[in-house]
């Protein structure tokens, strides 16, 4: 099969890195980068770190409004699909690149394969929710990561072509986790970031959702990070450039002991999660990785597409932007007295197993669903 795969953002490059070797072993891939994320720290660096192929087509369609960006991608994709005449177009996740890839293909009658199908926050104020709902309803193959996602698709009448495949992000984390397991990896990261980092002695944070770029939301989560940070437990906030720009525009300041750093490499992100006292995030990928690595995680959202992670008894909890709740959960999940022992034990006993998603996807793509 000839498959055009469309990526554009950091998490899509990470998922593509998990799929590409298996995809290329079995099918012919034409690799298209929309350029939705374009700077070195959010995109360029991942090509070399993760061994991704050079894109066959680069659209350079980053920036602008949602409509402008999606329109530029549609206009860029159509002639490529006409020229390449693929058997399928594969899209990942829930971004504007996902929407544009699915729509451009479906309008040309080309079957669409959607990786991470069926996820729902049930919150249509989120641009991601709109993108994933449309992609799911256009898809011929719906590759679901969890049984909940399969049930969500069924509830919307989507049953044909649904395959429960597992999670590509877990597979990549399983592949590289041995490289970051030794706590001594923190020494080089500490030196580079200029912050003293001991196992269990810091918090790792990422924030990038659109709703968390509103001024009131930024003030609220900055307050949570400032309250959680201390001289002997700094917060490392790996800040998405879009969030940084929104903070600068609104004049939101970070608290003492909150170190704001540029977006980090994939392995550094995994290492900082594994050895942290706790992770604080609104990211879909980071909340999953923290759970797989066994790190306590405060999710700064009121809904999640991954309800199996935040069920009762888990190490992950939805705290929204409620500071009192966040601090109480932090103390419950990562009590100050035991985080060092917990982090060392977590790293020493880590055993992460691949879900086999890449193989399941490439096998299913070999023929059209019944
Ligand atoms: N990530 C990274 N560097 C960072 C922060 C995150 O490599 O500074 C990785 C993280 O480990 C995960 C992915 O980016 O694999 C998550 O992507 P993101 O949070 O941008 O998007 P989401 O998962 O919310 O769609």
Image: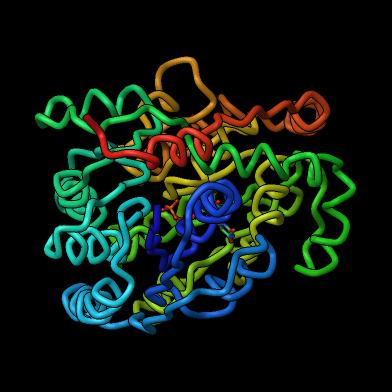
- The image shows residue 78 at horizontal and vertical percentages of 22, 76
For residue 49, side relative to residue 103 (left or right): right
Q: Can residue 77 be seen at all in this image of the molecule?
A: yes
Name the residue nearer the viewer: 216 or 343: 343
Name the residue nearer the viewer: 286 or 141: 141
Name the residue nearer the viewer: 31 or 319: 31
Q: Can residue 225 be seen at all in this image of the molecule?
A: no
Residue at 29%, 67% in the rendered image: 85
Please tell me in which quadrant of the rendered image residue 311 appears.
Answer: top left
Residue at 62%, 50% in the rendered image: 204
Farthest-out residue, top: 313
Colour scheme employed for the rendering of this structure: rainbow
For residue 151, side relative to residue 8 (left or right): left
**How many labels, in total?**
0
Residue at 15%, 65% in the rendered image: 108
Please tell me in which quadrant of the rendered image residue 201 appears.
Answer: top right
- The image shows residue 214 at horizontal and vertical percentages of 28, 65
From what the image shows, is residue 142 above or below residue 147? below
Q: Quadrant of the C terminus?
A: top left
Residue at 51%, 55% in the rendered image: 16
From what the image shows, is residue 270 above or below residue 305? below
- The image shows residue 333 at horizontal and vertical percentages of 58, 27
For residue 248, side relative to residue 258 (left or right): left
């Amino acid at each position: 099969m000839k498959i055009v795969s469309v990526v554009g953002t950091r998490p899509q490059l990470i998922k593509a890195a998990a799929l590409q070797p298996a995809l290329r072993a079995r099918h012919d891939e034409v690799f298209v980068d929309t350029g939705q994320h374009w700077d070195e720290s959010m995109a360029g660096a991942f090509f070399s770190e993760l061994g991704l192929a050079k894109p066959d087509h680069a659209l350079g369609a980053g920036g602008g409004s949602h409509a402008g960006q999606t329109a530029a991608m549609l206009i860029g994709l159509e002639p490529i699909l006409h020229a390449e005449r693929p058997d399928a177009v594969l899209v990942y996740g829930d971004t504007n690149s996902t929407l544009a890839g699915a729509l451009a293909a479906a309008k040309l009658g080309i079957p669409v394969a959607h990786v991470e199908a069926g996820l729902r926050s049930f919150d249509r104020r989120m641009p991601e929710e709109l993108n994933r709902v449309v992609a799911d309803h256009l898809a011929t193959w719906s590759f679901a990561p969890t049984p909940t996602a399969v049930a969500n698709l069924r509830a919307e009448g989507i049953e044909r072509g649904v395959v429960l495949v597992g999670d590509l992000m877990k597979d990549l984390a399983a592949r590289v986790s041995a490289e970051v397991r030794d706590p001594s990896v923190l020494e080089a990261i500490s030196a580079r970031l200029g912050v003293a980092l001991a196992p269990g002695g810091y918090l790792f944070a990422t924030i990038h959702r659109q709703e968390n770029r509103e001024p009131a939301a930024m003030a609220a989560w900055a307050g949570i990070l400032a309250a959680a940070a201390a001289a002997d437990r700094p917060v490392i906030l790996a800040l998405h450039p879009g969030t940084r720009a929104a903070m600068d525009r609104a004049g939101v300041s970070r608290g003492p002991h909150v170190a704001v750093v540029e977006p980090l490499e994939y392995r550094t992100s995994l290492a900082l999660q594994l050895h942290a006292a706790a992770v604080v995030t609104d990211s879909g990928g980071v909340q999953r990785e923290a759970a797989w690595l066994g790190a306590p995680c405060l999710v700064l959202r009121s809904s999640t597409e991954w309800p199996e992670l935040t069920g009762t008894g888990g190490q992950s909890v939805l705290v929204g932007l409620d500071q009192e709740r966040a601090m109480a959960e932090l103390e419950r999940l990562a009590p100050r007295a035991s985080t060092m022992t917990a982090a060392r034990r977590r790293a020493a006993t880590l055993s992460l197993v691949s879900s086999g998603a890449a193989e399941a996807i490439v096998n299913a793509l070999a023929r059209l669903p019944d």
